[in-house]
Image: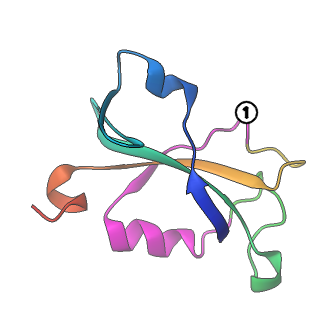
Amino acid sequence: MKNIRNYSAEKYRTSSYQAVEPDIYQCAEGFVTSLCFEQEPELGEGTSSAELSQYPLEDVLDRYYVSVSDFYDELNTPDSRDCRLEFCGTASKTFGS
């Protein structure tokens, strides 16, 4: 993964999400944020955003106790290099409470 940056999804501007920090939102499922990144095919990752690699994604999920809660299928297409995913966690796990 490279060129990792925040992705501000339009859905975060609805009443279902409350901003608690810049680019971190609280919703019914817990706390969410979305990231945009590029995969590195030369390191065995996918060649497009429609072909998301398990590694290093599994490391992110395990290290930060989060799950993928939205795959943004409409944006992660074979002709796009930018991958977008929403990550969800709970305060007790994600923030070590």
In the rendered view, would you say 10 is above or below 2?
above
Q: Residue 25: image x %, image y %?
A: 34, 37
Q: Residue at x 56, y 33 (%)?
A: 9
- Looking at the rendered structure, the number of numbered marks drawn on it comes to 1
In the rendered view, would you say 12 is above or below 15?
below
Choose top left, top right, bottom left or bottom right for residue 76.
top right
Q: Residue at x 46, y 21 (%)?
A: 13
> Which portion, as a residue range, is magenta?
53-75
In the displayed orientation, state which residue is furthest to the bottom.
43
Q: Residue 87: image x %, image y %?
A: 44, 50
In the displayed orientation, state which residue is furthest to the front.
22
Picture quarter with the N terminus: bottom right
In the rendered view, would you say 90 is above or below 29?
below
The coloring applied to the image is: rainbow
From the image, tell me which residue sits under label 1.
74
**Left or right, residue 75 beside residue 47:** left
Q: Residue 91: image x %, image y %?
A: 18, 51
Q: Is 62 within the magenta? A: yes
Q: What residue type is labelled 1?
A: Glu
> Is 79 in front, or is 12?
12
**Left or right, residue 26 beside residue 79:** left
Q: Secondary structure under badge 1?
A: loop
**Left or right, residue 43 beside residue 6:** right
Q: Is 97 within the magenta? A: no
Q: Residue at x 20, y 60 (%)?
A: 95
Q: Residue 10: image x %, image y %?
A: 56, 25
